[in-house]
Amino acid sequence: MQVITSSKEMQQYALQKRAEGKSIGFVPTMGFLHEGHAGLMREAKKTTEVNIVSVFVNPTQFGPNEDFETYPRDFDHDLDLVKEERMDVLFFPEVDEIYSETDMIELHVTNRTEVLCGSRRPGHFDGVVTVLTKLFHLTQPNVVYFGMKDAQQVAVVEGLIHTFHFPIEVKRVQTIREEDGLAKSSRNVRLTEAERREAPIIYELLRWGRTLIESGHLSIETAEKEIKQRLSEGLKLGKIDYLQILSYPELLPVHDPNGELILAVAVFYQNARLIDNIIFDVKGR
């Protein structure tokens, strides 16, 4: 496995592999890697010939009062995991390899961001699409791999690729979970023992909510209220940030359930904000 820190070297490597006719899989991450990231890498190994993972904590997607400086970092651990998964390249650039003072273009997302996490983090997805556009040009992927835990991000990335006609396939990878159902996340380490014991109720209520919606006995608006109330009653230490049912990937209000829906939730704990979701089709397609 090769570690590349230079943007120029990364692009030269990727262009050479494309010239050789090799397919490239790319897993962009912000580091502090865990089993969820490993699942993305394993999916890449199945489907593409050259596999690249990036570790870059992107400053432009953090708001003024968010956790850029305290975001967990452990490069040695990340390096060991990437080696264990037998990826070909770990791209680990410094900030000035990705952004410079002479940059004159920033991207702005106009759809799919006014709900869920996007409504709480203005500018966040602008930073996401800006850095991904840069990373896509540097790594030249045929396929990119994203976990469905952050389903809004996947929806935005799919929109980015469609809008700019990137010749890239987005591979949606199902959320990797702990044995008790909690979605794996780098922020889980910030939970207290008591919070960690409580947190699995989030996924439990998502599954219950899906069953409630699929029964067809309630309107979407009423079902949303019922699910939110039940989750609120179950949380003793956490506090609901949002709970919404929307169309997917459009992320629009649902009036006539048809096609994919997302039931998404975010919960605040003392030092962590957890997100999770279930995506399903009420008609079983």
Image (tube, helix red, strand yellow):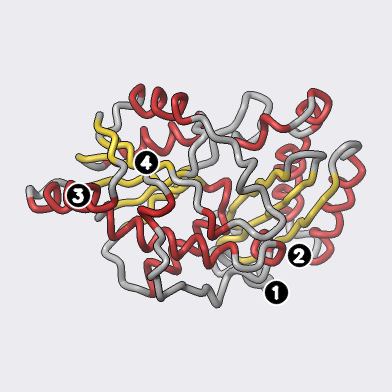
Question: Mark 3 is on which residue type?
Answer: Ala
Q: State how far apart marks 4 and 1 are (Cα).
A: 45 Å
Out of 156 and 138, give the one closest to the viewer. 138
Q: State how far apart marks 3 and 2 are (Cα).
A: 46 Å
* Contact, mark 1 vs mark 3 (Cβ under 8 Å): no
Q: Give the mark nearest the N terminus, 3 or 2.
A: 3
Question: Mark 2 is on which residue type?
Answer: Ile
Q: Give the mark nearest the N terminus, 1 or 3.
A: 3
Secondary element at image label 1: loop
Question: Mark 1 is on which residue type?
Answer: His
Q: Give the mark nearest the N terminus, 3 or 4.
A: 3
Residue 168 sits in quarter: bottom left
Q: Residue at x 88, y 37 (%)?
A: 237
Q: Residue at x 40, y 23 (%)?
A: 80
Q: Residues within 10 Å of mark 2 (few under 14, many from 20)?
A: many
Please name the residue that numbered disc 2 is placed on.
220
Secondary element at image label 4: loop
Please name the residue that numbered disc 3 is placed on.
14
Q: Give the mark nearest the N terminus, 4 or 1.
A: 4
Q: How many marks?
A: 4
Question: Mark 4 is on which residue type?
Answer: Phe
- As drawn, which residue projects farthest toward the front? 101
Relative to 261, residue 52 above or below:
above
Please name the residue that numbered disc 1 is placed on.
255
Please name the residue that numbered disc 4 is placed on.
92
Q: Residues within 10 Å of mark 4 (few under 14, many from 20)?
A: many
Residue 46 sits in quarter: top left
The answer to whether residue 142 shows anywhere in this view is: no
Image depth: mark 4 or mark 1 in front = 4
